[in-house]
Amino acid sequence: MSAKYFHLTVKEVIDETPDTKTFTFWHPIHQAVSYKAGQFLTLIPVINGKKERRSYSMSSSPNRDASIAITVKRVPNGLVSNFLCDNLKVGDAIEVMEPMGHFIIEPNPRQARTIVLVGGGSGITPLLSIAKSVLPVETQSKVYLIYGSRNEENIIFKKQLEALESEFAGRFRVLHVLSQPSYTWTGYKTRINQASVVTFLKQDFALDIAKAEYYLCGPAGMMEQVEAAIKIFGVTPAQIHQEHFFASHDEKAMEEEEETSSLKEQTVTIQYEGEDYQVLVKPHETILEAALRDDIDLPYSCQAGMCTACLGKCTSGKVRMDEEDGLTDNEIKQGYILTCVAHPLSSGVVIEIE
Ligand SMILES: Cc1cc2nc3c(=O)[nH]c(=O)nc-3n(C[C@H](O)[C@H](O)[C@H](O)COP(=O)(O)OP(=O)(O)OC[C@H]3O[C@@H](n4cnc5c(N)ncnc54)[C@H](O)[C@@H]3O)c2cc1C
Ligand code: FES
């Protein structure tokens, strides 16, 4: 299926915190946007005459909320997050790519499970969607949220989370963890790390760590520490779901510089929507960059190996990826690649894009 593009009109703009806004959208007139809890939209605003793309997870729930919503936190000097927060207003239309992503949950009324959500900063958005979607449907399941913020005024969705806690009393619990709270804060003053997360799970929530399903979304360091902690208790990779919002660009740039020296110019065949395209990929380019340079309209969003919008399958030749975290080991074994971080390592590379 090729990527679908359409426009959404802003219905409402809500100030969540001093640097975070929620934008709700009207569904298009002819067809409601269908999505799963945890998925993201790719927004394509035109800034200084150029189309930019950024991914934003839905903070709304497909089965509970009438409107689709995204929640954007300003990144210092960030191009798109500040543009959206400063300019996008009620009645504006913005181009988007259809919802995508594998950080999803499909609520099932027959399930009786324990779901642990761990988030930091803007990483709360898909977690809120997941909580709102699961709680009303899975009446036997329990959901626990550990949410890290800088201080009280930076807690996104504080009131919404409190309202959900009272609506689903006994089945939804939230633990706020602040790194720099005010002196009046009586809760935890720490970061979510390998040691503290075990305390939260065992002492605050009294959970059997090995038996829960985990959804993690926040800074990469936080997710690594949580993963390391719960694995010690026997949690398997299949129980852990992660969404990365940001790549460590500096680290990535350094690695790429070292590694491009071993790459050669190669011609790659891309099979997309029934056509075969021959693309010359230069050593410093990814396969996606080379295809876009040749005006081949391949699907993509984050361009950092995180969102999987650019998924393809290598059916011939050898390919190397700068970043493999976006795919499971099984997907990599089957030949799946992310074109935005992939380089051809041999001649005769063929990539199939669905
Ligand atoms: C699947 C997915 C879902 C996402 N969902 C959301 C969401 O729901 N809400 C949301 O606010 N964002 C979300 N993001 C992040 C979002 O797509 C943008 O990356 C973010 O808004 C920054 O874009 P920008 O154009 O403002 O910054 P850019 O102009 O792209 O970046 C400016 C500089 O800041 C650095 N930078 C970017 N982010 C950070 C950070 N957090 N901390 C420190 N440095 C940073 C960049 O490396 C760059 O050097 C998501 C990303 C992905 C991949
Ligand atoms: S565009 Fe997001 S993983 Fe490639």
Image (tube, rainbow, N blue to C red):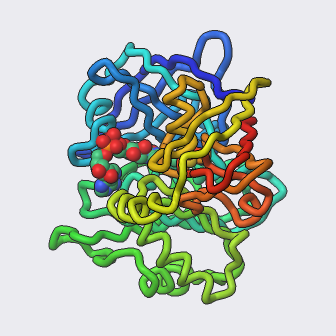
Task: Give the residue at x 71% y 63%.
Answer: 141
Residue most extreme to the right:
110
Task: Give the residue at x 57% y 51%.
Answer: 343
Height in image: 166 above or below 23? below
Residue most extreme to the top:
29
250 left or right, relative to 43: left
| Residue 120 seen in this snapshot | no
Q: Quadrant of the N terminus?
A: top right
User: How many marks are shown on the rendered structure?
Assistant: 0
Task: Give the residue at x 46% y 30%.
Answer: 43
Q: Quadrant of residue 116?
A: bottom right
Q: Nearer the viewer, residue 101 or 327?
A: 327
Q: Quadrant of the C terminus?
A: top right
Q: Quadrant of residue 227?
A: bottom right
Residue 12 appears at what percent x and percent y? 39, 24
Task: Give the residue at x 49% y 74%.
Answer: 224
Q: Nearer the viewer, residue 12 or 162?
A: 12
| Residue 225 seen in this snapshot | yes
Height in image: 329 above or below 285? below
Residue 39 appears at what percent x and percent y? 60, 43
Height in image: 276 above or below 185? above
Dividing the image into four quarters, tell me where ligand 2 lies. Answer: top right
Q: Nearer the viewer, residue 309 or 191?
A: 309
Residue 62 appears at what percent x and percent y? 63, 37
Residue 281 appears at what percent x and percent y? 55, 41
Q: Nearer the viewer, residue 291 or 38?
A: 291
101 left or right, relative to 83: right
